[in-house]
Image (cartoon, coloured by chain):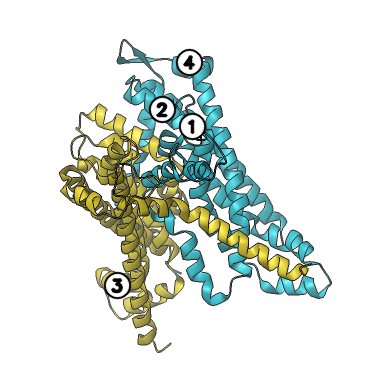
Chain colours: A yellow, B cyan
Amino acid sequence: MMSRRSFARLAVVVYVALIYGFIFLPVLVLIVFSFQDGKLPVPPFRGFTLKWYDALFANRRLMDSLANSVVVALGSGAVSTVLGFLAAFGLARHRPAGAPMIRWLLVLPLFVSYLVIGMGLLLMLRELGISKSLLTVGMGHLVINLPLAFAVIYGQMGDHQVYAERAARDLGAGEATVLRRITVPMLWPALFAAFALTFTFSWDEFIIAFLLSVFDVTLPVELWSLLRRGLNPQANAAGSLVFTVTIAVLILALLAYRLHRRKDAGGTGR
Amino acid sequence: MPGRDSRGWGYVLPALAWTLAFFVLPFLLMACYSLWRFDAGKVQHVWTYENYEAFIARPHFLQALVNSLEVTALTVVLSVLLAYPLAWILAFRVPRHLQKIALVLAVLPFWTSYLVRSYSWLLVLSDRGIVNSALLAAGIVETPLELAHNRGATVLGFTHFFTMLLTLTIFASLVQINPHYHAAAADLGASRLRIFLRITLPLSLPGVVVGAFLTFVVAVGDFVTPQILGGGTELLMPQAIMLQISRYVNLPMASAMSLVLMAVVSLVFFACARWLRVRSQASP
């Protein structure tokens, strides 16, 4: 007989193994069969090849859509971070009348399905006679990214910054100087987190991009037409590539954040 | 603390204007569309309730909503049941220096493109996918099981995604519990089960509810997962809405259905918010 304690420990190990297996199974299958030397990304594994990645890089439409995605994600990420920061600063520091209501309104899009947001914008474009383009996709992504950036930055606006800002004002700094020399440098990690987060959300967003684009499309929309053709190793290769890029962006973001924190800690002697 | 002043408006204005122009206005427009007539392939600017009447009267519309609610409810329950033990183990059984890396690993596939994630499950579940290949090779089945393209596959795809999300929110609420509570209860002779049921579980419930609500909002509005993994015979709400847009170009009907979906989400939101408020008032 096993003792109760070692049985409990075994149960924990088995559970963790099973659930990590469940979480990683599809990703592993995706990556392994992107190297499949055959027409179908299913067992048996017929040998290792990179030809599907070659096909991917030779796929002009896919590469164009990748470039489009980067542009849209950079644009909507940057604009939403700037607008989100300004709104957070205005609400936290100047507390205009009706601030709680504005705060609610700004985060409201987080609670609405992307499909509904995309459809509303589709109707609006139709009424105004604006044709679909990458710009309209970016506008749609700004709608979903702005509340995200605002929430992240607003949550990091602590009181210690208020004191630093007030000290700077007492010493004669104008509003612009306070923003540039005190607020932004102190909030840099939050601003960076907001940008990285909004970038990845835009990079991965499908349904709004699908509804609001027509000729120039983003990567997920192009992937969609690739995936619709059924199981094929090129789709595996594309999926593996997207995964790698996203992870790389996140690791870079994390490293930059760490580096900054260390510098910060060193600077104040902590 | 800085006082109230009107300078704040200048900073808030761009974000506020954007939200009003491209979120609130389109929403109001959608409400108008849902009350306009669709006739002979065209939108007529005539006010009518007939889109909502059609939604209630025609069984396949209502059925899509029921399907969506069933799939989402099942997803939420399964994800919580899978994520809670994992979050608990990560919070209390994994050594502190391994905690961060274990948590990052547990949510790593969260960052794959969600289109690709659904497609990946197809590689696992399809007729010639790895599960069926293994079962056939082992001689357990003669013909491949139909694992993909049905409701089960949709629920599995959703559960995979939201288990990761819920692990994060539940973990966050578990590590916030003051460890002294556990120690005090143990000193007073409470068994480990009793400590879990009377302290850990109730104090972590808000994290569960927040995660479950997020799961609900995202899952109930998702078009991709059911479209890739689901069956051809049953439609979920987002699929039914997309069908109205792309096949019938019936924007008034699609608007009415979107508003019904939003109304359902709002109801669930108010139920969750009320529960959280009642709880926070009840506790000292």
Image spot of residue B93 (x, y percent): 63, 70
In the image, which is nearer the foreground, mark 3 or mark 2? 2
What is the crowding at mark 1: few (fewer than 14 residues within 10 Å), some, or many (at least 20)? Answer: many
Q: Secondary structure at mark 2?
A: helix
Residue located beneath label 1 in the image: B261
Up the image or down, A6 lies above or below B201; here it is below
- Residue annotated with mark 2: B241
Chain under disc 1: B
On the question of residue B139 being in view, the answer is yes
Q: Whole-Å distance between the Cαs marked 1 and 3?
A: 45 Å
The residue pinned by badge 4 equals B54
Task: Find residue A136 and report its horizontal and vertical position in percent.
Answer: 24, 40
Asked whether, in this view, residue B258 is left or right of residue B138, the answer is left
Q: CA distance from mark 2 to mark 4?
A: 14 Å
Q: Earlier in the sequence, mark 2 or mark 4?
A: 4
Residue located 37% across and 46% down the image: B116
Nearer mark to the viewer, of 1 and 3: 1
In the rendered structure, are the residues bearing label 1 and label 3 in contact, judged by CB atoms less than 8 Å apart?
A: no
**Amino acid residing under circle 2:** Ile
Q: Are marks 2 and 4 on the same chain?
A: yes
The residue mark sitting in front, 4 or 3, is: 4
Q: CA distance from mark 3 to mark 2?
A: 49 Å
In the image, residue A135 above or below residue A229:
below
Q: CA distance from mark 1 to mark 4?
A: 15 Å
At x 35%, y 33%, the residue is: A120
Q: Is residue B262 left or right of residue A5?
A: left
In the rendered image, residues at marks 1 and 4 fall on the same chain: yes
Does the CB distance between marks 2 and 1 fall below 8 Å? yes
Give the secondary structure at mark 3: helix
